[in-house]
Image: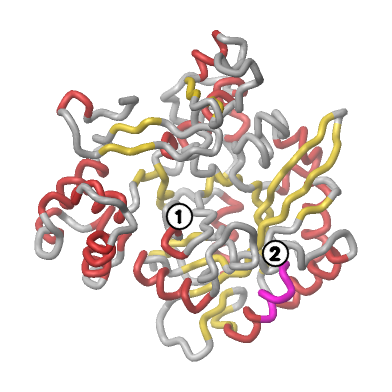
């Protein structure tokens, strides 16, 4: 079967998240999106874990469904953990995604973590020990768990982050880097950017939404062809199985909020080349710029842009359907007109099928022509994006002057 998975989301118990981030509402949105395997998020939070145990039942080993549920939607137990620690004379901040098979394993992980910090403080708890120690702790509980460095290139909280990360997985995890089978590319990078580092050739690149509200799930995802089986899915990721890992679904990385360099407060956004020409100093305030993902990739890469390693897992870029509708209708994404048309469309087919799979002839049976045009432009990459920077999402334009319809600045 085809499995569309989003493994990294958050619950309402994480900071800056929607109150609707709980499994019943998430299940509704997963069906709208076309996702059939969804991470629970935040299993480290005691209150949310109790809710998960009350609302979910095991369907297959390591996979769960809503109690009384009759469809094929499955949940997998996941959480994100923040480690802030000193190593080699620098403060490091690394976020990691944990995937676990059972509530028993989760309980054992949580007991160990509770000795080191306050699990009730946030759905994404913070600890003062190293990311390597977290890896050893989790795998010490169960070797069936998977640890994935989250949004691996984000400047402030990631394994390769320009402000507090490392230059390699080995620098962060030492000899235990061999147990890091995958990294999450994050919204501000895509597989092609990661392919520029030969050191990542043996690592599986996964993509997830890191959603803080239900409507944002599935904006990045992973597509497998396999059984709905925990061990098989984890095995595909560990083995970088190119036959069963079909592709990832990606944001246009330029739309991510840390793609370019810049200063939000100064309204300064710069390409890596421009930043380097200024010594990475903001021309407005004279302080150090926030160095974005593209700049960091350039600094660590040993290959030219455009290199494709042998056996690379492909990817497809998309723009969320509500954003396409909003631009086609020339109104805000949160307006009633957009919401009504979105709901009408996803009642006929899931969002990801609409964006990726359905042929134009079928789309035109229930989608307005201007929206069809926008969907096809996105499929072909004929969009323009003002890149995001320093926490500001990029601005996308699908419809515009003909000469502006190739990907780039406007």
Instruction: Give the residue number, with chain letter if any, for mark 2.
Output: 144
Check residue 221 in the rendering and tell me which mark sits there, or answer none: 1
Q: Nearer the viewer, residue 89 or 73?
A: 89
Indicate the quadrant where residue 161 lies: top right
> Would you place residue 143 above or below residue 171 in this image?
below
Q: Nearer the viewer, residue 341 or 194?
A: 341
Q: Main secondary structure of the magenta part?
A: helix
Q: Residue at x 19, y 33 (%)?
A: 400
Q: Quadrant of the C terminus?
A: top left
List the single residue furthest toward the bottom. Answer: 68
Q: Residues within 10 Å of mark 2 (few under 14, many from 20)?
A: some
Q: Is residue 174 left or right of residue 369?
A: right
Indicate the quadrant where residue 44 lies: bottom right
Q: Is residue 117 left or right of residue 121?
A: right
Check residue 389 in the rendering and tell me which mark sits there, or answer none: none
The magenta stretch is: 44-50
Q: Quadrant of the N terminus?
A: bottom left
Assign a secondary structure to mark 2.
Answer: loop
> Measured from the top left, where is residue 352 in percent x and y?
32, 59
Indicate the quadrant where residue 35 lies: bottom left
Of the residues tagged 1 and 2, which is closer to the observer? 1
Assign a secondary structure to mark 1.
Answer: strand
Q: Residue at x 54, y 48 (%)?
A: 240
> Measured from the top left, where is residue 173 in percent x and y?
78, 41
């Amino acid at each position: 079967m085809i499995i569309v998975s989003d493994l990294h989301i958050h619950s309402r118990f994480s900071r800056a998240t929607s109150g609707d981030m709980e499994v019943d509402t998430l299940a509704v949105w997963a069906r709208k999106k076309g996702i059939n395997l969804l991470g629970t998020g935040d299993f480290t939070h005691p209150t949310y874990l109790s809710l998960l145990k009350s609302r979910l039942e095991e369907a297959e080993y390591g996979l769960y469904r809503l109690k009384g549920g009759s469809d094929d939607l499955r949940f997998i137990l996941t959480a994100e953990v923040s480690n802030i620690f000193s190593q080699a004379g620098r403060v490091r901040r690394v976020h990691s995604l944990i995937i676990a098979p059972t509530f028993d394993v989760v309980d054992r992980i949580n007991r160990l973590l509770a000795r080191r910090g306050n699990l009730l403080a946030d759905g994404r708890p913070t600890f003062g020990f190293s990311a390597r120690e977290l890896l050893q702790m989790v795998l010490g509980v169960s070797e069936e768990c998977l640890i994935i460095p989250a949004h691996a290139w984000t400047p402030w909280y990631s394994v390769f982050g320009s402000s507090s990360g490392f230059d390699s997985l080995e620098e962060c995890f030492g000899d235990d880097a061999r147990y890091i089978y995958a990294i999450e590319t994050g919204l501000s990078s895509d597989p092609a950017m990661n392919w520029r580092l030969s050191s990542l050739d043996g690592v599986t690149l996964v993509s997830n939404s890191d959603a803080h509200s239900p409507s944002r799930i599935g904006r990045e995802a992973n597509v497998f062809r396999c059984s709905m089986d925990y061990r098989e899915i984890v095995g595909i990721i560990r083995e970088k199985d190119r036959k069963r890992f079909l592709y990832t679904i990606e944001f246009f990385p330029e739309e991510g909020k840390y793609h370019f360099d810049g200063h939000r407060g100064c309204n300064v956004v710069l390409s890596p080349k421009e930043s380097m020409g200024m010594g990475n100093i903001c021309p407005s305030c004279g302080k150090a710029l926030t160095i974005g993902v593209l700049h960091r990739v350039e600094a660590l890469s040993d290959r030219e842009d455009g290199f494709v390693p042998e056996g690379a897992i492909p990817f497809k870029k998309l723009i969320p359907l509500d954003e396409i509708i909003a631009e086609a209708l020339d109104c805000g994404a949160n307006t009633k007109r957009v919401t009504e048309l979105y709901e009408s469309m996803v009642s006929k087919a899931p969002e990801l099928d609409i964006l990726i799979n359905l042929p134009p002839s079928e789309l035109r049976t229930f989608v307005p022509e201007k929206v069809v045009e926008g969907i096809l432009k996105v499929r072909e990459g004929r969009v323009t994006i003002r890149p995001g920077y320093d926490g500001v999402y990029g601005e996308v334009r699908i419809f515009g002057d003909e000469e502006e319809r190739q990907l780039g600045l406007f």
